[in-house]
């Protein structure tokens, strides 16, 4: 009896809302128990605050409600409107609803409440998934039935659409959640956005919570704590289910992850912002990435990466790059490849934000291979020094001389020029307080707002003291300063290209033209240090190289002849390009 009393008032607002559309409401009723009499009654009211009850005869057992609609509410007298409302809010209640159509009573709530069952067949799941999706085709990729009595009384079912049909991010700016909220089979909210987060909007399903109050409105939830508790229980079960599927059928899960990876990663960001990261651990278990020690296309979890790490390794190393080929050929990866150290490769822009939002995985820190001044644990796998007596290495004094020279050339472009042991085959790299990948994205986001300073964050240029370009650059910086200055600028730009932070490659064209000119003239025997040809080309070669085309106009031929004479007198001019 107590349970029945608790139901009083839960649905009353539905009846009183009839006065919004009706001038008059009449309720004809007679008890279904013959022992209590055969008298019928009529309750009538115009909604002004009073009502009348009168005895009536010829009333069948049961209840009939008659609405006299207002002039501006005649829409509710249309059969299509009535059927739509009944199907929307009462499709699953456990007693039939009929509409009188074409001379007969036809049911409008034929759909079975599948989530109330303890189990269902694959065909039942398919049919229900199609019903929820509004399609006559398609099968769910995963199906989950979740029932529990603690912490709330929940009966639910969820469907994960095929990843081949994953929604495009371009057209889902403000997506509607595909899971609806019910209480005792009656729909409370068509889109349960207070329970299902936006990053899971693509799921289909139904949540039925008997503890959900409806004394205010079916469209507005007041108990936020209850909603939060319901959300935590449901989302945690969904994520645990996906983790179980990943372990049970790894290949099938890989396909699912490739289709929905962006949304799961977005979940990490949104969960931290809205819920202080309460689902972070469950979401991180679902992440999959390529890594340097596996073949292309093979994905590993963070757990698997940790299990493959070298003994004593305290960090998880990652690299945000456009694709595998670019990443593996990057100078930032050289020392890790040389040491056989595994590195996670991340290709999506959102990955950088995800890594920045988490402190680590379990007790491991996440370290970017292109970061500056980080502990890369180089003592874990030291590299044997090759005994190459012919390889020159700059001394400490020479390193300081060259770094001072390059710092003077690059000026505000760099905050520091230093030498590093992290380079193997490349002469230089650039590093910063933020990774080059994040730097590039920030520049893109701040486009048109360069005055904020975000687009001009200084970088550090790191050099290899053993690389032949660097040692030769030190040799010529005094003997041939113009060439050394051009080489310094080009070296810096090459490092920026490798980092992916060079905004417009077209700015290099003028300098590259000078570099090409230098190569051509040096090939012809010109010595820039001495300012003269050391071994002038033969007359025949000069004729072939310098003679203007036969079809060239005479004025152009005269210009070429004049330039040739000036060149013989002064040598080719090779000047520094002002950046």
Image (spheres, rainbow, N blue to C red):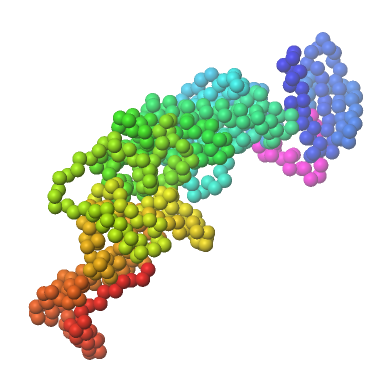
Q: Residue 105: tell me if it is visible.
A: no
Position of 482 relative to 461 (above/below): below
Outermost top residue = 35
The spot of residue 27 in percent (x, y) is 82, 27
| Magenta segment | 65-84
Looking at the rendering, which quadrant does residue 286 occupy? top left
Quadrant of the rendering where the N terminus is positioned: top right
294, 511: nearer the viewer: 511
The answer to whether residue 75 is magenta is yes
The residue under the point 87% across, 30% down is: 44
At which x and y percent is residue 252? 38, 32
User: Looking at the image, which residue is at 57% across and 46% down?
Assistant: 174
Within the magenta stretch, is there residue 193?
no
Q: Quadrant of residue 361?
A: top left
Quarter of the rendering containing residue 523:
bottom left
Residue at x 42% of width, y 27% of height = 245
Q: Main secondary structure of the magenta part?
A: helix
């Amino acid at each position: 009896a107590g349970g029945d009393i608790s139901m009083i008032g839960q649905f009353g607002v539905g009846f009183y809302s009839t006065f919004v559309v009706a001038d008059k409401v009449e309720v004809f009723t007679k008890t279904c128990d013959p022992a209590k009499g055969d008298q019928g009654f009529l309750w009538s009211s115009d909604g002004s605050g009073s009502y009348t009850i009168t005895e009536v005869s010829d009333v069948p057992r049961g209840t009939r409600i008659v609405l006299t609609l207002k002039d501006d509410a005649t829409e509710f007298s249309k059969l299509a409107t009535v059927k739509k409302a009944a199907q929307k809010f009462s499709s699953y209640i456990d007693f039939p609803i009929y509409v009188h159509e074409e001379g007969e009573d036809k049911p409008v709530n034929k759909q079975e409440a599948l989530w109330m069952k303890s189990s269902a067949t694959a065909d039942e799941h398919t049919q229900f998934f199609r019903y929820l999706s509004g399609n006559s085709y398609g099968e769910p990729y995963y199906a989950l039935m979740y029932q529990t009595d603690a912490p709330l009384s929940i009966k639910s079912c969820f469907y994960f659409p095929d990843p081949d049909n994953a929604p495009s991010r371009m057209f889902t700016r403000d997506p509607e959640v595909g899971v609806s909220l019910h209480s005792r089979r009656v729909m409370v909210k068509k889109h349960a956005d207070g329970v299902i987060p936006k990053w899971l909007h693509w799921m289909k399903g139904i949540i039925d919570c008997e503890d959900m109050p409806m004394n205010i409105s079916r469209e507005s939830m007041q108990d936020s704590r209850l909603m939060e508790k319901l959300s935590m229980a449901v989302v945690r079960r969904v994520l645990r289910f996906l983790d179980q599927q990943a372990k049970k059928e790894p290949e099938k899960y890989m396909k699912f992850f490739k289709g929905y990876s962006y949304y799961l990663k977005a979940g990490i960001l949104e969960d931290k912002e809205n819920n202080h990261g309460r689902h972070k651990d469950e979401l991180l278990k679902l992440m999959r990435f390529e890594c340097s020690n596996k073949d292309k296309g093979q994905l590993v979890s963070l757990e698997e990466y940790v299990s493959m790490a070298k003994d004593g390794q305290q960090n998880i190393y990652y690299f945000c790059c456009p694709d595998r080929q670019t990443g593996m050929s990057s100078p930032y990866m050289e020392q890790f490849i040389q040491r056989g150290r595994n590195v996670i490769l991340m290709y999506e822009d959102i990955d950088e934000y995800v890594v920045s939002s988490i402190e680590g995985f379990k007790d491991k820190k996440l370290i970017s291979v292109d970061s500056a001044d980080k502990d890369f644990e180089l003592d874990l796998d030291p590299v044997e020094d090759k005994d190459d007596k012919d390889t020159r290495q700059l001394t400490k004094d020479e390193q300081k001389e060259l770094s001072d020279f390059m710092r003077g050339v690059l000026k505000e472009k760099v905050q520091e020029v230093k030498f590093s042991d992290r380079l193997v085959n490349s002469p230089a790299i650039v590093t910063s307080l933020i990774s080059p990948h994040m730097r590039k994205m920030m520049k893109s986001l701040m486009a048109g707002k360069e005055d904020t300073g975000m687009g001009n964050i200084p970088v550090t240029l790191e050099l290899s003291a053993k690389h032949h370009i660097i040692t030769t650059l030190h040799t010529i910086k005094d003997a041939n300063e113009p060439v050394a200055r051009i080489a310094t600028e080009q070296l810096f730009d090459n490092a920026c290209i490798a980092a992916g932070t060079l905004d417009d490659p077209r700015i290099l064209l003028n300098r590259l033209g000078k570099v090409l000119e230098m190569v051509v003239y040096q090939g012809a025997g010109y010595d820039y240090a001495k300012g003269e040809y050391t071994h002038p080309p033969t007359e025949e070669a000069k004729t072939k190289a310098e003679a203007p085309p036969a079809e060239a106009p005479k004025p152009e031929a005269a210009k070429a002849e004049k330039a040739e004479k000036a060149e013989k007198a002064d040598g080719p001019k090779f000047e520094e390009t002002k950046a």
